[in-house]
Amino acid sequence: MRASIRCCCLLFYLLLFSASSNAQVAAVTFTVQVPSIDSAKGVYLAGSFNYWHAGDSLYRMKKIGDNRYALTLPVFDNHSYHYKYTLGHWNRVELAANDSNINNRVFESANGKQITDTVIKWKALMPASAQTNPQMQQINAMKDSALAKLQPELNNMIDFLKQYVQNFLKAEPSASLHRRLDKKVEKKIGSAYRQVTKLLWDVFASISPEQKKQMNELLNKPEAQKDFINALGNAFGTVVEGKKQ
């Protein structure tokens, strides 16, 4: 329940953001059949939509049946995204039947799209010393802290959404109430935006000059200019975690 509420909050935030930036948001639903796993473990989606964070709590899938999991993601419409399934760590990522790494899965976003996948097997557990990238650990800790601070504001946006809808459904909707709500929401979005940019400031301050140079090279490629948001996620995963995009 808590995960679904957080996902709804994130979706509403993206909808509000998209309204101001003329971007369109699409809800894409993933369903995956996986090999049997310990009930305490979770199945996660990781990809260019979340900077390749292998154990992002916002991308933990919900169990819907016998070794079947599902999750609906808010993403930008008409974009190409890369992704894989994990058990919360890159040392437990999905593999091919012969234990080799698989190519990134790819999908083109469209509202209402349904994607059904099958995971053949998981990568075997590695020694603890090989499980984490210290730099990524630090960055993920910063992100988790920022999300915890941001969550109350995102929760408030659900209340605003209810007020908007209640007003819309009146026989004679109030234009003045609509304007008052707009002003309140603008303040909330401004506050949330400042927290997000503060997180980005801290994250980029934590990477080395050489990593910044590598990211610049990736982001200056012609294909990156066409889809900057997706390219930024790919570049970040490539430079910080060495993921093949």
Image (cartoon, rainbow, N blue to C red):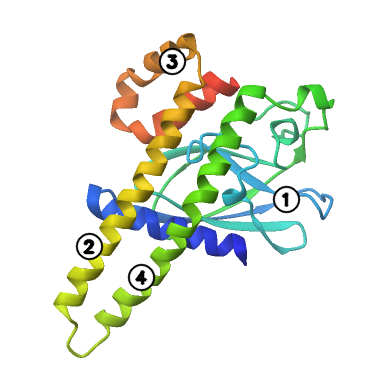
**Residue receiving disc 4:** 161
Left-right relation of 172 to 91: left
| Mark 1 in CB contact with mark 4 (< 8 angstroms) | no
Name which of mark 2 and mark 3 comes first in the sequence: 2
**Disc nearest the viewer among 2 and 4:** 2
What amino acid is at disc 1? Gly
Q: Which residue corresponds to the image point at 59% horizontal and 23% vertical from the top-left?
A: 241
Q: What element does badge 2 sit on?
A: helix
C-alpha span from label 2 to label 4:
13 Å
What amino acid is at disc 3? Lys
The correct choice, above or below, for 146 with respect to 15 in the image is: above
What amino acid is at disc 4? Leu
C-alpha span from label 3 to label 1:
33 Å
The correct choice, above or below, for 146 with respect to 6 in the image is: above
**Residue 42: which numbered mark, if any?**
1
| Mark 2 in CB contact with mark 3 (< 8 angstroms) | no
In front here: 120 or 13?
A: 13
Left-right relation of 239 to 164: right
Q: Which residue corresponds to the image point at 60% horizontal and 36% vertical from the top-left?
A: 141
Residue 112: which quarter of the image?
A: bottom left
Name which of mark 3 and mark 1 comes first in the sequence: 1
Q: Could one spot residue 33 in this view of the protein?
A: yes
Name which of mark 1 and mark 2 comes first in the sequence: 1
What amino acid is at disc 2? Lys
C-alpha span from label 2 to label 3:
37 Å
**Residue receiving disc 3:** 212
Residue 153 x %, y %: 43, 58
C-alpha span from label 1 to label 4:
31 Å
**Residue receiving disc 2:** 183
Q: What element does badge 4 sit on?
A: helix
Left-right relation of 185 to 33: left
**Disc nearest the viewer among 1 and 4:** 4
